[in-house]
Amino acid sequence: MRPFRLLAAVAVMVFVVSATPARAQVERPLFLEGYGAFIIPTGDYADVVKASIGFGAGFGLYTTPAIVLMGNFNWGLMKGKEGIFPDQDLLSYFAMVGYDVTAAVPNASVILFAGGGGATFKTKPEAGESDSQTKFALNGGIKAYIWVSPQFGIMGAANASYAFTSESETDSSNTFFFPLVAGLAVRF
């Protein structure tokens, strides 16, 4: 239960900071993004699946010029190691809080973020029904944007994610994965 308490404390802090009336407002506070991903498994998870491609989408809302509330969804098409583990869909979804370290720079954004959510591991056996496990997960990382116009930008991110799994459920007691993403973003 400690991860839930930590997320609640972070949410309260963001609310308090964003409620400060003296803060300037961001001209375009909402952004949407779509991206491709290269997902690198590590630890025990790398023993059963290979680094694979994926894709995803995300959104963000600036509550102050520096504080961003974000969410995202990733779908990794993980290739199982032959003879060891079947192919697997890795679906991850996170709610995050970010801090824009370049809040004063008009054509760039660099956001440090952390959050929590879930990861669903859905195996795709050759015959029979697929097995699906959803587990609580944490993530964090850095996102960088170059805004080529007031509305459109190019984004890249490096994330680190950890899902709380057991070996009997996913053949991995240590489920770390690192999505590296690149895509496009739109501000509103």
Image: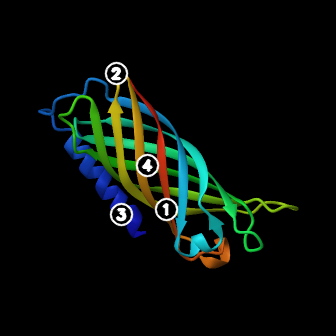
Amino acid on which the number 4 mark rests in the picture: Ala
Mark 3 packing: few (<14 Cα in 10 Å), some, or many (20+)?
few
Across and down, in percent, residue 119 comes to: 56, 58
Q: Quadrant of residue 101?
A: top left
> What label does residue 149 carry, if any?
2
Q: Earlier in the sequence, mark 1 or mark 2?
A: 1
Residue found 15% across the figure and 33% down from its top:
23
Relative placement, left or right, of 26 versus 43 is: left
Q: Earlier in the sequence, mark 3 or mark 2?
A: 3
Amino acid on which the number 3 mark rests in the picture: Arg
Q: Secondary structure at mark 4?
A: strand
Q: Where is mark 1, residue-wise?
A: 137
Relative placement, left or right, of 70 versus 22 is: right
Amino acid on which the number 2 mark rests in the picture: Ser
Nearer the observer, disc 4 or disc 3? 4
Q: Where is mark 4, residue-wise?
A: 95
Q: Secondary structure at mark 3?
A: helix
Q: Earlier in the sequence, mark 4 or mark 1?
A: 4
Quadrant the C terminus occupies:
top left
Q: Secondary structure at mark 1?
A: strand
